[in-house]
Structure formats: structure tokens, C-alpha cells
Amino acid sequence: MSIINLFFGVAVLLTGLSAGLFYAYDCSVTGGLGKLPDREYLQAFQSINRAIQNPYFFISFIGALIALPVAAWQSYNSASNVAFYCLLAAAIVYAAGVFGVTVFGNVPLNDRLDKFDIAGSSAEAIKAMREQFESKWNALHQVRTYAGILAFVLLVIAIVKR
């Protein structure tokens, strides 16, 4: 197996894992959490935000960010123009739409929620926190979900066009 094929395969795997995680979360977790009362919603979200910070997540999330541009760079002269540009587009879409939205959108909201003292807050404060958090977080999550899916589709097109 060549180094190009190795990075290509790693990029496909890690991008697919990230896109799948965000897709599954969008299909199930946000809807399930959305049905919880305010206090339980915030408690569950705090718990999930803490649990997601693990090596499995970071390997796919950061790994795709690294593997995609490396695969594009390595395919510059060895793949068709369509495959190269699909890889390049996948890297850009992932970097901006998945990584960028997560780091500059979802994570600051997660950090704000993590610092919120649910146990010491009134029902009104809890309701206000949920209103400030939920719709913004969900909208940003949908952006990164669609970006992850688009990056993966671009990789599939690159495979076909190689």
C-alpha cells in the first residue's frame, strides 16, 4: 500500500466516523434531550459534553483535520484533477464547517454551560440558560453535521474519480 492510499484511507475512515457521530447525534440525542425538562436537559448536556472529551472522539475529530489536507496534498500530482479538487474541497469544508464551527461555536457554548451551577440556580435561571443555549447549539450542530456529510461525500467522489 502506498503512502497516498494510506492517507486517503485514513481520511475516509476518520471523516466518516466524525460525520457519522454528528449525524447520529442529530438523529437521536438532540431530539431525546429536547424532550427533557429544563433542569434534566442541562444536567444531561453537561454530562454528555464532559464524556465526549475522550481519545476516541479526538482521534477522529482531529485526525480527519490532519489527514484530509495531507491526502489532498499527496494526490496533487498523482490523482485526477477531479479527485484532487474533491479532496481539497473536503479538507476545506471539514476545517471550516466541522472543526471551525465546533471550536468557535459549540465549544464556547459547552464551556458556558459547564460553568453554570444548575444545583444552585432557580428554575427561572435554568429556563433562561436553556433558552440561551439550546437553539444556538442545535443550529451550530446542524451546520457541522451537514459539513461533515458533505466532506464525506466529496471523499467518495474523489474515490470514484481517482
Image (cartoon, rainbow, N blue to C red):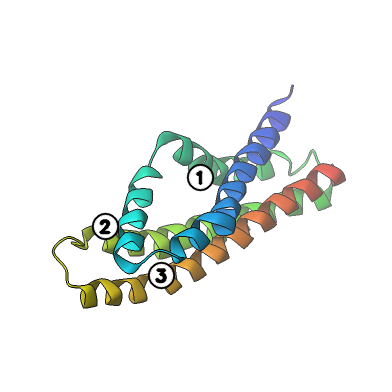
- The answer to which image quadrant residue 151 occupies is bottom right
Q: Which one is closest to the eye, mark 2 or mark 1?
A: 2
Amino acid type of the residue that numbered disc 1 sits on in the rendered structure: Phe
Estimate the x, y position of residue 124 in percent, counting from the top left.
Answer: 23, 78
- The answer to which image quadrant residue 142 occupies is bottom right
What crowding class fits label 1: few (fewer than 14 Cα within 10 Å), some (14-19), or many (20 or more)?
many
Estimate the x, y position of residue 126 in percent, counting from the top left.
Answer: 25, 71
Vertical comparison of 132 with 49: above or below: below
Relative to 102, is 83 on the left or the right? right
Q: Residue at x 33, y 71 (%)?
A: 130
What number is the disc on residue 61? 1
Relative to 121, is 94 on the left or the right? right
Vertical comparison of 130 with 48: above or below: below
What number is the disc on residue 134? 3
What element does badge 3 sit on?
helix
Relative to 15, is 133 on the left or the right? left
What element does badge 2 sit on?
helix
Amino acid type of the residue that numbered disc 3 sits on in the rendered structure: Glu
What crowding class fits label 2: few (fewer than 14 Cα within 10 Å), some (14-19), or many (20 or more)?
some
Q: Earlier in the sequence, mark 2 or mark 1?
A: 1
- Closer-to-camera residue (102/82): 102
What element does badge 1 sit on?
helix
Q: Residue at x 41, y 45 (%)?
A: 52
| Residue linked to disc 2 | 114
Residue 68 in view here: no
Residue 19 in view here: yes
Q: CA distance from mark 2 to mark 3?
A: 14 Å
What number is the disc on residue 127? none
What crowding class fits label 3: few (fewer than 14 Cα within 10 Å), some (14-19), or many (20 or more)?
some
Vertical comparison of 56 with 47: above or below: above
Amino acid type of the residue that numbered disc 2 sits on in the rendered structure: Asp
